[in-house]
Amino acid sequence: MSGNWFTARLQAIAGAFAIALAITPAVAQAPLPLTDILGKASDSALTKLGQPGAFYADEAVRIALPGPLARANGILKLTDQAGLTTGITKSLNDAAGQAAGAAKPIFRAAISKMTISDVPGLLTKSDGATSYLRQSAGTELRAKLRPLIVGALGKTGAFTQMDKLGKVSPLLGSVGIGKDTLTDSVTDQAMNGIFKYMGSEEAKLRANPLDLGKKLLGVQ
């Protein structure tokens, strides 16, 4: 297979994507390569966030303690329990990362159901598909991500750490933080981080359709 043929093939794919992205929403009634872009963006985002320590390392998506406990942490810093709350924060971020790494099939399934039908901004905004996915399937995705978060919080020891803190400090009980509250907080924050990364990855792929063509062909 000659280099010229391969280059021509990639250029043809890039041209096809460029044409697809230029189609007006009004005439796009079936799944387009835009879903391929979103699928790749989803996989890439979840792979990055699924790396050990990824959530905690990025302050833009770092999982924080739930509001009441975060405020209580200011008081706990004056005691020898401050180190325990730091450990909990890291466990929450580790749990979010584990859940993200396991969430690819969930997001891919939602993306496969997408059809493009007169959605303003979907084809023109750099993160239009990501925004539309969150708007149309965000509730469903959250419901499916939450059990992954529950399992990950157990594996990372976050629930055990919360119980331990509750035993050594009556302050925790006074702010009303339980397992469900903690799970909901981590789930919501993880969703925000995932969609933030997806939007960024989508924008990169839209800006470089030739690179997308390579990815779809499995070429590095």
Image (spheres, rainbow, N blue to C red):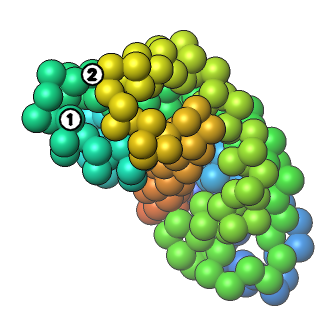
Residue beneath the point at 80% across and 42% down: 109
State if disc 2 and disc 1 touch (CB < 8 Å): yes
Judge from the rendering whether residue 111 lies leftward or rightward of residue 17; answer left or right: right
Q: Quadrant of the N terminus?
A: top right
Q: Position of residue 204 (x, y in %)?
A: 43, 55
Which mark sits nearer the N-terminus, 1 or 2? 1
- Which amino acid type corresponds to the residue marked 1 in the rendered image? Leu
- Residue at image position (36%, 23%) is 165
Q: Residue at x 34, y 37 (%)?
A: 171
Provide the residue designation for mark 2. 84
> Which residue extends farthest left?
78
Residue 31 picture location, percent across and down: 83, 60
Distance in Å between CA atoms under marks 1 and 2:
9 Å
Residue 63 seen from this side: no
Q: Nearer the viewer, residue 101 or 149?
A: 149
Circle 2 crowding by C-alpha within 10 Å: few under 14, some 14–19, many from 20: some
Whether residue 206 sits left or right of residue 164 in the image: it is right
Placement of 22 over or under 159, stated as above or below: below
Label 1: which residue? 76
Which residue is at the front of the view, 146 or 97?
146
Across and down, in percent, residue 130 comes to 60, 61
Secondary structure found at label 2: helix
